[in-house]
Amino acid sequence: AQQPFSWLGSLRELTEVHLHLWDNRIGEPELRGLASLKALPALKILSLDLGANQIVGPAVEPLGSLSACPALTSLSLCLRNNRSEEGRVGEEGRSWWSPDH
């Protein structure tokens, strides 16, 4: 079965992606699909607002592969106010990645 959001990896011409997916019950399966963005050769700027979803603990690991985007110069990731389905609270905060750091 195809991962949710994996179709984004087929949009080869994209240079900038901003997704605001606040409060959409996003968890590990959807993050595996979003990780398909790493296949975009021209992607320079990526901003993901994934606050108030179901991303806690190891569920965030698929996003680590996004640093492999060959042209990426800016990644903004918001994971505030996430909870597991059982109600466990995830870590709050924002993190930014750039190839300079």
Image: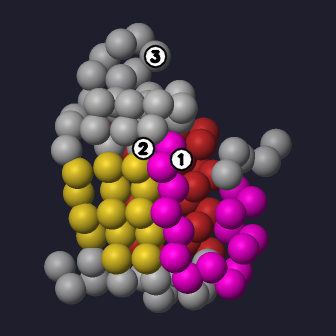
**Mark 2, other Cα within 10 Å: few <14 / some 14–19 / many ≥20:** many
Magenta span covers which residues? 6-21
Q: Nearer the viewer, residue 26 or 57?
A: 26
**Above or below, comparing residue 68 to residue 93 in the picture:** below
- CA gap between label 3 and label 1 equals 15 Å
Check whether the beta carbons of the residues at disc 2 and disc 1 lie within 8 A of each other: yes
Q: Amino acid at mark 1?
A: Leu
**Residue to which mark 2 is pinned:** 50
Give the SS element for disc 2: loop
User: Which residue appears at 53% of the width and 68% of the height?
Assistant: 17
Does residue 17 show up magenta in the picture? yes
Position of residue 99 in the picture relative to residue 9 (left or right):
left
**Above or below, comparing residue 22 to residue 61 in the picture:** above
- Of the two numbered discs 3 and 2 on the same chain, state the one appearing first in sequence: 2
Does residue 23 show up magenta in the picture? no
- Of the two numbered discs 3 and 1 on the same chain, state the one appearing first in sequence: 1
User: Which residue appears at 74% of the width and 60% of the height?
Assistant: 7
- Residue 10 in sight in this render: yes
Classify residue 64 by image quadrant: bottom left
| Image disc number at residue 85 | 3
Check whether the beta carbons of the residues at disc 3 and disc 1 lie within 8 A of each other: no
Q: Amino acid at mark 2?
A: Leu
Q: Amino acid at mark 3?
A: Glu
**Above or below, comparing residue 19 to residue 88 in the picture:** below
Position of residue 68 in the picture relative to residue 89 (left or right):
right
Image quadrant where one finds the C terminus: bottom left
Q: Nearer the viewer, residue 1 or 49?
A: 49
